C-alpha cells in the first residue's frame, strides 16, 4: 500500500520513494456537495510525472466531479487543487485557459464535431489554441496524431462513418495533438465491446510511454484498471479510501470494493 508521509512524500511497501518534484498534480481535502448530497467529502491525491493513475469507484461516487473540479469545470466547496504549479481555484479565466492547454481531457463521449471531417476536427484545436495555420504544419501534425492512434486511413471520414472505438481514438488524437503534460480520461472504455476496450487500454499505455504524460483514468471497468494502472486510488463514500498497485488493491476485503474483483 502507499502511505502518505510528511512533506507530501510517499512510500510504498516495496520501500520506494518518489520525490516532491515528481508530483504534477495534487488535490487536498476536496469537498463538493450538490444540495444535500455530499459527493466528495475529503479527497486527497497526488499524480506523479509519467504515471497512469486509475481512480476506481462505483457509478455516482463522484469520479467525474473530481476531474471536472481539477480542470476548473466545477467549483468545489472546499479544498485545494494544484495542477502543474497552477493553484486552480485561484486562477482567472486567462490563467485557467493557459493551464487547460497543458491538460488533455478525453470526455465520456468523444466530443467530435459531427459536421467536420476527422482532419478538420484535429485541425480545429491547432488553429484555435496554437494559432497554427500553415497547411504543411497542420497536415504533418494531424497525420502524426492519427498515426499514433492507428487511424490515418480515417482522415477524410466524417464522425458518423466511424465506430464508437474509432471515435474515441480520434477524440484522444485531438487531445494529444496539443502535446498535453497531463491526460484525463473519463470512462475511456464506456460503451465499447471487450476487444475495442483492449485497444483503447493499449492506446492509453502507449500514450504514457510515447508522450511521457501523466494520466488520470477514471473508471469502474476493472479490466481497464488492471491493464492501464501503475497505481490505483479507490474512491468510496466521498473519500480516497484505498491506494496502491492494482494487485495490492485487489486484496481488499472492503465490502464496497471487494465485489469489483469478483470478475
Ligand atoms: N452538475 C451537477 N449537479 C447536480 N448533481 C451533480 C452534478 N454533477 C454530478 N452530480 C451528481 O454527483 C454524483 C457523482 O456524479 P459523477 O458523474 O461524478 O459520478 P461518477 O463516479 O463519475 O459515476 P459514473 O461512473 O456513473 O460516471 C451523482 O450523484 C451526480 O448526480
Image: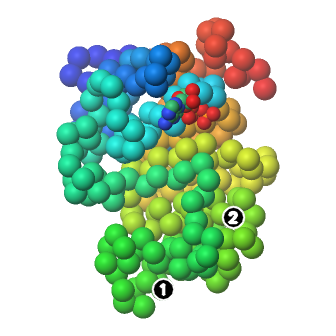
Name the spot of residue 30 as percent of width and height, x first.
Answer: 35, 24
Disc 2 versus disc 1: distance between alpha carbons?
A: 20 Å
Q: Mark 1: few, some, or many residues within 10 Å (few <14, many ≥20)?
A: some
Circle 1: element type:
helix
Q: Nearer the viewer, residue 210 or 187?
A: 187
Name the spot of residue 63 as percent of width and height, x first.
Answer: 52, 32
Instruction: Report the residue at 26% width, 57% height from top.
Output: 98
Q: Mark 2: few, some, or many residues within 10 Å (few <14, many ≥20)?
A: many
Q: Is residue 131 above or below residue 24?
A: below
Instruction: Report the residue at 69% width, 64% height from top.
Output: 166
Asked if one can make out residue 190 in the rendered structure from this viewpoint, the answer is yes
For label 1, the residue is: 139
Circle 2: element type:
helix
Q: Is residue 158 above or below residue 175?
A: below
Q: Kindly indicate the quadrant of the structure image that contains residue 163.
A: bottom right
For label 2, the residue is: 166
Where does ligand 1 appear, by image quarter?
top right
Asked if one can make out residue 55 in the rendered structure from this viewpoint, the answer is no
Name the spot of residue 8 as percent of width and height, x first.
Answer: 26, 24
Q: Is residue 83 left or right of residue 257?
A: left
Q: Kindly indicate the quadrant of the structure image that contains residue 70.
A: top left
Q: Nearer the viewer, residue 247 or 232?
A: 232
Q: Give the quarter of the figure containing the C terminus.
A: top right
Q: Is residue 152 above or below residue 30?
A: below
Q: Earlier in the sequence, mark 2 or mark 1?
A: 1
Amino acid at each position: 500500500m502507499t502511505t502518505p508521509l510528511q512533506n507530501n512524500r510517499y512510500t510504498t511497501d516495496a520501500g520506494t520513494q518518489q520525490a516532491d518534484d515528481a508530483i504534477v498534480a495534487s488535490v487536498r481535502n476536496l469537498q463538493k456537495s450538490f444540495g444535500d448530497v455530499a459527493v466528495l467529502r475529503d479527497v486527497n491525491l497526488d499524480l506523479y510525472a509519467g504515471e497512469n493513475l486509475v481512480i476506481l469507484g462505483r457509478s455516482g461516487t463522484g469520479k467525474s466531479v473530481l476531474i471536472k473540479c481539477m480542470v476548473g469545470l466545477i467549483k468545489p466547496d472546499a479544498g485545494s487543487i494544484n495542477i502543474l504549479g497552477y493553484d486552480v481555484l485561484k486562477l482567472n479565466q486567462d490563467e485557467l485557459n493557459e493551464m487547460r492547454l497543458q491538460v488533455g481531457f478525453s470526455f465520456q463521449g468523444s466530443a467530435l464535431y459531427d459536421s467536420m471531417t476527422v482532419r478538420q476536427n484535429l485541425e480545429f484545436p491547432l488553429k484555435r489554441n496554437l494559432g497554427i495555420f500553415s497547411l504543411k504544419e497542420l497536415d504533418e501534425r494531424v497525420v502524426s496524431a492519427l498515426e499514433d492512434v492507428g487511424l490515418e486511413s480515417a482522415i477524410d471520414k466524417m464522425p458518423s462513418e466511424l465506430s464508437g472505438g474509432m471515435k474515441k481514438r480520434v477524440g484522444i488524437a485531438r487531445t494529444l495533438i496539443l502535446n498535453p503534460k497531463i491526460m484525463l480520461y473519463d470512462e475511456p472504455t464506456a460503451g465499447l465491446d471487450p476487444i475495442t476496450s483492449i485497444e483503447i487500454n493499449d492506446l492509453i499505455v502507449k500514450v504514457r510511454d510515447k508522450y511521457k504524460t501523466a494520466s488520470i483514468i477514471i473508471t469502474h471497468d476493472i479490466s481497464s484498471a488492471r491493464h492501464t494502472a501503475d497505481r490505483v486510488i479507490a474512491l468510496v463514500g466521498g473519500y480516497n479510501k484505498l491506494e496502491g498497485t492494482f494487485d495490492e488493491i485487489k486484496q481488499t476485503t472492503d465490502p464496497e470494493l471487494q465485489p469489483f474483483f469478483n470478475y
